[in-house]
Amino acid sequence: MSTSLRTIVVDLTPLLPGGENGGAKVFILELLSRLAEIAPQTQFILLTQAAAHEELAALDRPNMRRLITVDVPEIDRPRPRLLPVASFVLARLPVRLKRVVSQLRYALNTMMRHSDSEEINRRVAEPLLRTLRADLLFCPFTMPTYSEVGTPTICTIHDLQHKTYPEFFTEEDLAERDRIFNEACRRATALAAVSEYSRDTAVSQGSLVPTRVRTIHHRIAGRILSMGVMDKEILSRLGLIPNRYLLYPANFWKHKNHEMLLTAFGMACQAGLAADIQLVCTGAPGARQEWLTRAAHAMNLAERVLFPGYLPNEELATLIANCRGLVFPSLYEGFGLPVVEAMAAGVPVACSNNTSLPEVAANAAILFDPRIPTQIAQAMLSLVEDEELRAFLIQAGLQRASEFSDSQRMAREYWELFEVSAAGYQPSDRLSGVYPDGWAGPRIHVELAPAKKPQALTIELFAPQWLPHARVHIKSLQSFSRHESNQTLLGRGESNTLILHFPVEGGVADICVTPSFVPAHSGFGKDTRDLSVLLRQCIIERGATDKVVLHTLSENILAAIQP
């Protein structure tokens, strides 16, 4: 392998302990292990948050080390479902009360986010990638939080589920997921999609040039075979009989469609499914698991449905290898890793016929409509009873899984993308954190490319008269300066112009505006974006005649903006 990439920084700060990250965590841990093997001359620096730092010790190698950069809750990713009980209660409140509680929750989240401002400032004030002498930044959880001008950035796109099923997310989560995707589209040198389905969706939703997005499939189906799959102790502990249970390994997120699965399993039982066949649903515990457990009791299925919670990889491998079949009724998947993992273990599969799953499963699985319980029920009956079909699925599945089992090939595909992106990277002037209609989020990010002369950046901000807050606080920080270059207050109906001076080597500026607001929570329509002020113009000046306009808002558009 080429050694032109001497140092690669990998942003793992969104990675959480346990199973909250789902299949994305499984993928990145395997990928990093293989990258370290195929590029022994490259140093990989893994940026972590304190909560997950020790769990990642298994990745330590002579050419791979960990670095804690976040010791507070990560601020630049969609917030995980840390309060599932609150979400469960909120969903059942009357509409008017729900709106009040939602506003309170948003206010609390805003306070938490603003309390992390020192962490934001530290990141911006210290050019981390430059300090680490990084040749490339890899963001496997999509958000390019640490990107800097002069360093190529690769982001992985897993899915855009929130575009298809916005009802499964809070307003805050929707706005945050939109922001993350938009930032990746604007700031990444190239993007890697985990399936053709995810790639096509990203190109369409992000209006991306197709050549910027490359499909690199998860090729880690074979990891199941390397684990202790014949260890029956876990089965005994859970009270399971080998080959007499169906398995659904998935976190209890709404798109995983557990309610429909329980309904279909009940129908299959009534249709004659053998009395000793159980249904096992693994996944990180929480309020939805508790709700589903109560639902199983209410359906008289308590003795036949098991919720063992989150299981370590070795235990989950044992459950997969010894089940009668894997049933996967998800409404949305960016890839669907458990499908090929089961196939690799010689287990027949039945899965949904939507999103990426037909691409991954091909003709090696029973495909059903996940919205029709009778189809799911029939698929479960076939997995258990139809020996001829089972034999076909097992053989076809083994062949299909072989196409997704070469993790070194996956690592080489990523490495090739790294090298191509680094070789063709050209620093450019970029603006992010601002929407096409001129509204800015709480953080405006500007990157200036190197130039022959010193540079000046002019930013004009405007606070509409109807802004929910009487005034906002504006703070600008620059990557090459360790002190705050500007701080000011901006009141309703006022404009403020910032002029920031940059050296010839370029740099990064972040404009942090607090507090921000969500229009839908302030009585201004249904807009769920997290907004701060309007950006009237953003102009780079390199001498008297050389000007680059990154953004301008016409007075006609400004006059038309209404609350």
Image (cartoon, rainbow, N blue to C red):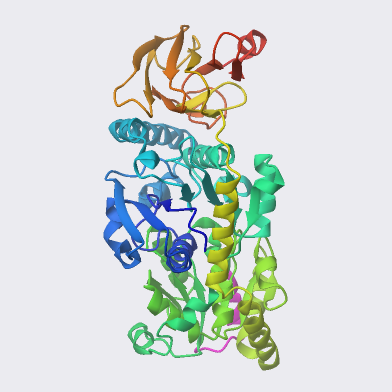
**Can you see residue 339?**
yes
- Where does the image place residue 281, in percent across and percent down from the top left? 46, 72
Of the pair 470 and 473, the residue shown nearer to us: 473
Magenta residues, start to end: 262-276
- Is residue 158 visible in the rendered image? The answer is no
Q: Is residue 342 above or below residue 285?
A: below
The x, y position of residue 352, in whole percent, is 65, 67
Name the residue rendered at 67%, 57% in the picture: 197
Most common secondary structure along the magenta stretch? helix
Query: Which residue shows up at 71% across the image and 47% down it?
Result: 210
Judge from the rendering whether residue 58 lies leftward or rightward of residue 138; answer left or right. Answer: left
Quarter of the image with the C terminus is top right
Residue 407 vs residue 369, the one in the foreground = 407
Image point 36% across, 32% down: which residue?
Answer: 124
Q: Quadrant of residue 347?
A: bottom right
| Magenta span contains residue 275 | yes
On the picture, is 403 further left or further right than 324?
Answer: right
